[in-house]
Amino acid sequence: MSVRDREGHARDDMVVAALHQLAPHLDGEPDPAFRAATRARLVAMAAVRSPEPEPVSGFKRLLAARAEDAAPSRWRTRLTAGLAGAALTVTAGASLVALSSGAQPGDVLYGLKRGTEQTQLALAGDSRGQTLLDFASTRLDELETLVADAPSALPATGGGTGSATTVLAAGADPELVISTLETMDDQTGEGTAWLTDRAVTTQDEGPLDDLGVWVTAQTDELAALAPQLPDAAGAAVSHSLALLTEVSARTGELQVALDCASGPAVGAADQLGPTPATCVPAAPEGPAQSTGTGVPGTGSTTTQPTTPGLPTPPGSGTGSGSTGTGGGTGGLPVPGAPTVPGGPSIPGLPTPTIPGLPTITLPGTEPSGPIIDLPDGGPVEICLPPLVC
């Protein structure tokens, strides 16, 4: 053993001897007075800080007893799990819908975007026509995105030095462009038909005004985009432009038809809604009545309009007073013939008289000429034309 080890053991022995000397003093119990004072202080503190227990009613005791006896129900656990699953499903669906709003034709979520549009259309109500036109505008925006996102073409090889660079045409997928244009045309026609029918039914030009503003903007935007679309989609682009031109013309014609005085001049409906028709002028306020004006010696009558509340002009009578054939008198008295009470007469015309002959007045009539007393005795000879005496 080395010297260092021996010195270490010696120091350890000294420490152990010192601990043995202190052991009796450390194992002693606390002073009884200190213990009593500490106990009293702890009891006082507990009495001040501890609240009194709340009184328990009998109903609470009953519920507590039933809760202890009843087994934990499973439906609560299942309900909680179902609600949590439904919340996760709704959250995931909302996230997918939000992501699909920016989907373009050909994307995975584009079908979900179109399905969301059908749901919006079903809930559109009275704004269905404008909603369809908004969807048609969305299709045009998608075409612009397809053109913008089309792959860039590389320059054609084989060009000589100093010659113009020829670029290979790439462009958007023609099939996607054509299908998008067809969908846009369907939505344009359906929205136009809904708005035109709404305008004619309510006799309100408001839907036609909105349609006119939309079709102008849509036509300008498609005409500007047409040169950038693939050549294979040229026929579809021409059809879409022709449809927009037809919609613009139909809008203007229906606006004129709604201003017709006799009501909206419309005909049968087609794919764009009601078609314009010829405006029929409104009938006059006073009804026209047929009056027969007889002409002596003829069987013809003339028709003259009459105004309600005004007397019939002199010389006019109903058509039944004239004869069709055989040269009737047409309701006028024969010159020289006596006037029968209640018969037809023309006010303001003098009764013809024969010079040298007295005037005969029938009972109930007033004389229209001078009264001559007949002499007593002797017959009176009267000649009436066309009779010969």
Image (spheres, rainbow, N blue to C red):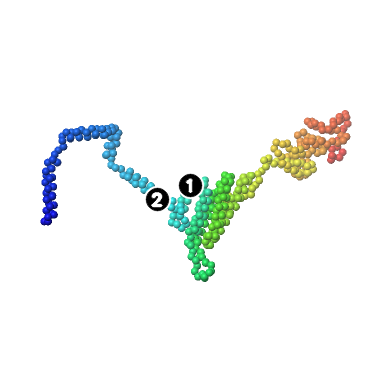
128 left or right, relative to 321: left
Q: Mark 2 highlights which residue?
A: 92
Q: Position of residue 266 (x, y in %)?
A: 60, 48
- In the image, is residue 385 above or below residue 378? below
Which is closer to the viewer, label 1 or label 2?
2
Disc 1 and disc 2: Cα gap in Å? 22 Å
What quarter of the picture does the C terminus occupy? top right
Which quadrant holds residue 335? top right
User: In this orientation, which residue lies closer to the viewer: 304 or 276?
Assistant: 276
Mark 2 residue crowding within 10 angstroms, few (<14) / some (14–19) / many (20+): few
**What residue is drawn where x is 54% and y is 49%?**
194
54 left or right, relative to 298: left
Q: Position of residue 165 (x, y in %)?
A: 52, 67
User: In this orientation, which residue lies closer to the viewer: 330 or 167?
Assistant: 167
For the question of whether residue 197 can be seen, the reply is no
Mark 1 residue crowding within 10 angstroms, few (<14) / some (14–19) / many (20+): few
For the question of whether residue 309 can be seen, the reply is yes
Q: Where is residue 268 in the image (x, y as percent from the top left)?
A: 59, 50
Question: Disc count in the image?
Answer: 2
**Residue 123 numbered tag:** 1
Q: Position of residue 103 (x, y in %)?
A: 46, 55
Q: Which amino acid does label 1 sit on?
A: Leu
Mark 1 vs 2: CB contact within 8 A: no
SS state under label 1: loop
